[in-house]
């Protein structure tokens, strides 16, 4: 049986763990709020971009001369997966789930005989995937938004890299794998195809009268400028989603940890008190039996 | 009171301007164009340049001037939405400040290599365009 001192030490250590986890929970909660605000602030741009794309699309004539970003290269042999996780751990299954989902995806694609390349965004994706898919990893980006706020330039870096690879003919299909922020409790690993880009259904959310739009320059040229931009916007949106999800997951995980620590303290204190009482009783018995013997 | 329409300037990170204005001029890819209420629907890409926002009327001699480094404009009869990649109010810039920025970027450009170099070149071009807009 551990001595009283050992119990006291353990209780003290669990208490300080609880302090840390509850502080981390608070920090995550306030970061989550900020992340959600950022996600909201990016909404108008994304919405306007989607609106423009659907307008251009509704005026588009299908032809093989359309930008490759829209119609693809005509082959589906090489897939590029952008796997997006957080830089840090201690956020429950957030990174693990996503990486598992990505591995599943990689397995499916390889089973179909396709070539897979990976771009890892976030330190965890890089480290976890490097273990078993080192040969497939072509690029990795870490420290996204380390100074508190994710800038659009972060997303632009990723998009620029992907576009340069696409122009060089390094892959045919690009898919973004990230944690979609459903709500504070649920983050769902999602795969979204970026190249070839699936245009939003033309006019589905557009009940404004169908006035013919003028395009400057013409539709094709405009589209070839909009699509690369849209790629960056999609990546940016995913980054914000992922950042909000990370904080939400961390908040939940730390909340659980705090509660567990509380339970453990309760249990340990009970044992400690029992041991203390047993010790006192034992001493009393010794004193009494000593007095009787005299 | 002149007729007005809704002018919005949004960057990926935030909505920068959203107000009722009488006229804006936008640096379109194929030339600068003015937008008044009742403009026919138009989608245009933008080049680097200055958006002038006139609040009170077309004769407003003190327009708000905003520098944009390219983007897109969606114009309709009652709205004009500009999606800008980078936007700065010229009132917040000084010649000396932009000159310092150009100097700093050029110094960094001398040291940079490969991918970084191309990016800095683009930023120098933007900074120089800013400088030209101020002059």
Image (cartoon, coloured by chain):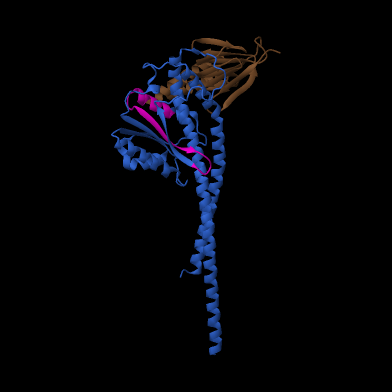
Chain colours: A blue, B brown
**Residue B95 figure quarter:** top right
Position of residue A195 relative to residue A210, above or below, is below
- Give coordinates of residue A38: x percent, y percent: 55, 33
The residue most toward the right is B1
Q: What's the magenta region?
A: A157-186
- Give coordinates of residue A122: x percent, y percent: 42, 38
Task: Give the residue drawn at x 57%, y 17%.
Answer: A209
Position of residue A59 relative to residue A248, above or below, is above
- Give coordinates of residue A185: x percent, y percent: 52, 44
Is-magenta flag for residue A237? no
Task: Give the residue drawn at x 66%, y 9%.
Answer: B59
Position of residue A104 relative to residue B29, above or below, is below
* Quadrant location, the C terminus of chain A: bottom right
- Give coordinates of residue B121: x percent, y percent: 43, 20
Pick whichever, A58 or B22, lies toward us.
A58
Task: Give the residue drawn at x 54%, y 40%.
Answer: A32
Pick whichever, B43 or A211, lies toward us.
A211
């Amino acid at each position: 049986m551990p001595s009283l001192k050992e119990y006291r030490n353990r209780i003290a250590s669990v208490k300080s763990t609880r302090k840390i986890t509850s502080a981390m929970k608070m920090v995550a909660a306030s970061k989550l709020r900020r992340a959600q605000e950022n996600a909201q602030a990016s909404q108008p741009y994304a919405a306007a971009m989607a609106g423009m794309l659907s307008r251009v699309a509704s005026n588009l004539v299908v032809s093989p001369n359309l930008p490759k970003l829209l119609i693809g290269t005509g082959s589906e042999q090489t897939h590029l997966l952008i796997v997006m996780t957080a830089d840090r751990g201690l956020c429950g299954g957030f990174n693990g789930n996503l990486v598992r989902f990505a591995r599943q995806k990689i397995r499916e694609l390889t089973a179909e005989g396709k070539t897979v390349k990976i771009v890892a965004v976030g330190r965890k994706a890089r480290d976890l995937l490097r273990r078993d898919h080192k040969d497939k990893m072509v690029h990795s980006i870490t420290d996204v938004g380390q100074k508190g706020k994710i800038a659009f330039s972060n997303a632009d870096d990723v998009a620029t890299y992907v576009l340069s690879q696409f122009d060089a003919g390094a892959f045919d299909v690009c898919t973004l794998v990230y944690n979609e922020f459903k709500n504070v409790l649920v983050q769902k690993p999602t795969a979204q195809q970026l190249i070839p880009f699936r245009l939003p259904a033309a006019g589905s959310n557009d009940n404004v009268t169908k006035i013919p739009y003028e395009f400057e320059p013409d539709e094709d040229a405009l589209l070839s400028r909009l699509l690369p931009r849209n790629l960056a916007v999609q990546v940016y949106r995913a980054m914000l989603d992922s950042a909000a999800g990370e904080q939400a997951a961390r908040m939940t995980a730390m909340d659980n940890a705090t509660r567990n620590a509380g339970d453990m303290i309760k249990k340990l204190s009970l044992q400690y008190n029992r041991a203390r009482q047993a010790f006192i009783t034992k001493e009393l018995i010794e004193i009494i039996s000593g007095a009787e013997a005299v | 009171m002149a007729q007005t329409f809704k002018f919005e300037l949004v960057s990926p990170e935030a909505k920068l301007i959203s107000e009722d204005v009488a006229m804006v001029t936008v640096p379109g890819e194929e030339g600068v164009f003015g937008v008044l209420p009742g403009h026919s629907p138009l989608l245009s890409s933008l080049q680097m340049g200055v958006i002038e926002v006139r609040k009170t009327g077309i004769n407003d001699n003190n327009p708000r001037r905003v520098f944009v480094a390219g983007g897109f404009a969606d114009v309709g009869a009652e709205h004009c939405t500009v999606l800008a990649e980078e936007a700065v109010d010229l009132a917040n810039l000084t010649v000396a400040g932009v000159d310092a920025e150009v100097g700093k970027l050029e110094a960094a450009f001398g040291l940079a290599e490969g991918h970084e170099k191309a990016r800095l070149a683009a930023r120098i071009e933007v900074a120089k365009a800013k400088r030209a807009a101020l002059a």
